[in-house]
Image: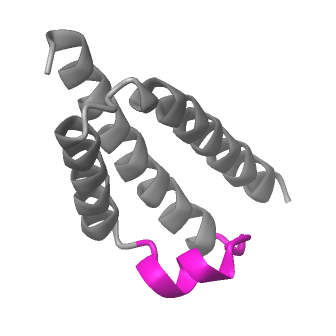
Amino acid sequence: MSAREIVTGIAFVLLNTLDAYLTRIALAIGAREANPFLDIAFRTDILLKGLVAIVIVAALAFWGRCSLLKWLNRVMLAVVLWNAVVIFMQLQT
């Protein structure tokens, strides 16, 4: 893995962890999980979500598909921004 791929992998793990953290906050202030599977599977467990992200990064590195991480990071960034908007909107009510 190149240095850029390592940074991209770390960013993916951090974005997933931030997503779990923001989801936990959103649920605590009254928002609801839009995806029922994720609600059952992760229960906003930050550590589990981080570990799953690490496994995904390792699998992509193993199969030489690290280029997919930049697209996954874009998706995760959108999810994190959405969670931030949900929290902001929930706090406004």
Question: Residue at coordinates 64% horizontally, 50% vertically from top-left?
Answer: 83
Q: Position of residue 28 (x, y in %)?
A: 57, 73
Residue ranking furthest to the right: 93
Above or below, comparing residue 26 to residue 81 in the picture: below
| Magenta residues, start to end | 29-44
| Residue in the picture at 24% in, 12% down | 4
Residue in front for this viewpoint, 65 or 16 = 65
Q: Is residue 2 magenta?
A: no
Going 40% across and 31% down the picture, which residue do you hit?
A: 69
For image coordinates 72% across by 46% down, the residue present is: 88
Location of residue 51 in the rendering, given as x and y in whole percent from the top left corner: 22, 60
Q: Is residue 45 left or right of residue 75?
A: left
Q: Is residue 67 above or below residue 92?
A: above
Query: Residue 19, image x and y in percent?
Result: 48, 51
16 left or right, relative to 4: right
Q: Is residue 54 left or right of residue 75?
A: left
- What colouring style does the render use? one colour
